Image: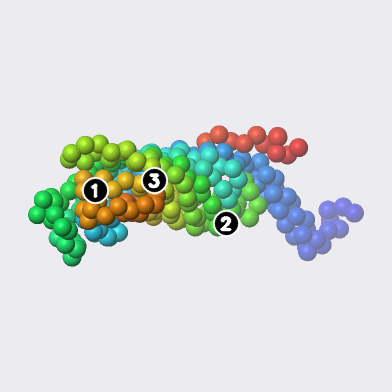
Amino acid sequence: MGVKGIRPLQLLALLLTALLQTTVATAQDEPEYRAEVGAGVGLQAYQGDYGGSITKMMQPCFGVLGKYKFNPRMAMALTIYHGKVKGELKNINTWYPESSEIAPEFSTTLTDVNVMFEYNFFPYGTGREYRGAKPLTPFIMLGPGMVIAKTPEKSVATGSLVIGLGAKYKVAPRVNITVDWAMHFTQSDKLDGLQDPYGIKSSGIFKNTDCYAALRASVSYDLWAKCRTCHKE
């Protein structure tokens, strides 16, 4: 049957089939990336013996990050952030036995290094490198960290546990924007320079310790494309 014998509906069906095959081929040819690198800024708020709130006296922070992607749902992130936390006695209604000797306020500079596992609620991507991937997904994160704090009296190094959630958005095939909020539970009660003001001994990893909340936004760029030939075999 020649071209003249093809009906309009048959011709339309052929054109749609060719377009679909071209789209699938294009999708299969676009690579997945194993890693991300980027930088971010944010705000963090102290909670401890000086009271504190996740919305009061928030201080700026900035940092860098790197991620290794196991698959479109799971990744491991390394973040390094530097910033401050502040607190004032006037923000609490608690009376301490030696309150006359306690400084009315404090300001601590801290650097935190965190290794966190991220789990995306949806497969993350453009949808062209992985079938069903979405450019926007919420996620949760959990992992250990290390905090180095410089108080007015001395420097303190302590471990921490980070628990948080956020959202990722792929604004371009290799560019990501992430916004996340996390609590950093440290193992020290010295970030504010005030240790155990009640004079009561306590036990437990995170009992009577300082913590802080962090709201951060970052931009990252995808690197290290997976081998296309390897995944087609």
Relative depth, front residue between 179 and 223: 179
Secondary structure found at label 3: strand
Res. 160 mark: 3
**Sooner in the amino-acid sequence: mark 1 or mark 2:** 2
Q: Looking at the image, is 84 positioned above or below residue 12?
A: above
Q: Quadrant of residue 208?
A: bottom left
CA neighbours of label 2 inside 10 A, class few (<14), some (14 to 19), many (20+): some
Label 1, label 3: how far apart the Cα atoms are: 17 Å
Side of 32 where 87 appears, left or right: left
Q: Residue at x 63, y 48 (%)?
A: 130
Q: Nearer the viewer, mark 1 or mark 2?
A: 1
**Relative horizontal placement of residue 222, taking residue 128 as reference (left or right):** left
Whether residue 150 is visible to the viewer of this picture, yes or no, is: yes
Picture residue at 26% right of the left edge, 45% below the top: 190
User: What residue did someone put label 2 on?
Assistant: 122
**Tag 1: residue type?**
Gln
> Considering only order in the chain, which callout, 3 or 2, is on the residue closer to the N terminus?
2
* x then y, percent, for residue 196: 24, 51
Circle 1 sits on which residue?
195
Q: Quadrant of the C terminus?
A: top right
Q: Quadrant of residue 151?
A: top left
**Please, what is the three-letter code of the amino acid marked with disc 2?**
Phe
